Amino acid sequence: MSLVNELLQVLVGFYVAALAAISVFGSVALDQPVLKATLNNKSISRRQFLAYVFGYLALISLVNYCLGVVAVLAADVLSSSPLALRIKPGLIFLYMLLWWNMVTVTLLGLYYLVDRAYRADPIVHQAPGDTED
């Protein structure tokens, strides 16, 4: 658990930096709407979607890091308690669930960022004199 917490220390900063980079990165492709995705019945841009993804990741990694720190600090105190032996598997399951959720959403966010940051949807321009039939 302490090795995962060391990685989480780095990931919190990575997610915050990614969030800042997405906010200021000038790209026409990121300003296009996400197809079939709405928030409060309003279309959202790719930039907004990625900001939500990396904001969520920053929050969940910070929460997971804090849970890990509390678990490491409480492990010595509660190691001999019979109650701790009963709840330990559940807490480990929760910690790992949050960890794998974070890994999965990170892969989704990175894939979407790499795929959509430079690839804009094609725009069809009508030639002068052409009319729609």
Image: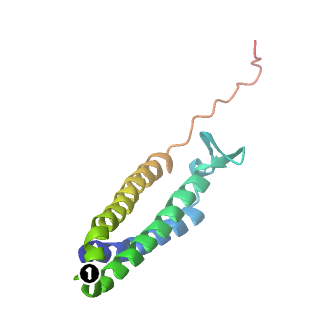
Name the residue furthest top.
133
Residue with the most extreme left position: 80
Quadrant where the N terminus is found in the figure? bottom left
Residue positioned 39% across, 56% down in the render:
101
**Residue 3: x, y in percent?**
24, 75
From the viewer's perspective, is 30 left or right of 9? right
Scheme of image coloration: rainbow
Q: Secondary structure at mark 1?
A: loop
Question: Is residue 80 or residue 100 the one in the foreground?
Answer: 80
Q: Position of residue 57 (x, y in %)?
A: 47, 63
Q: Is residue 2 placed above or below 111 in the rendered structure?
A: below
Q: Residue at x 34, y 67 (%)?
A: 91
In the displayed structure image, the side of residue 43 where residue 101 appears, left or right: left
Above or below 83: residue 116: above
Look at 49% across and 48% down and name the residue there.
Answer: 118
Task: For label 1, count other residues whose C-alpha is less than 10 Å away and answer few (under 14), some (14-19) or many (20+).
Answer: few
Number of marks present in the image shown? 1
Q: Is residue 88 left or right of residue 30?
A: left
In the image, residue 82 sits, relative to residue 98, either above or below, namely below
Tell me which residue sits at (42%, 54%) in the image. Answer: 105
> Between 130 and 34, which is closer to the camera in this rendering?
34
- Seen from the viewer's position, the closer of residues 68 and 33 is 68
The amino acid type of the residue labelled 1 equals: Ser
- If the image is split into quadrants, where does the C terminus sit? top right
Residue carrying label 1: 81
Residue 99, by quadrant, is bottom left
Position of residue 74 in the picture relative to residue 131 (left or right): left
Residue 104 image point, x, y percent: 38, 53
Q: Position of residue 28 (x, y in %)?
A: 61, 50
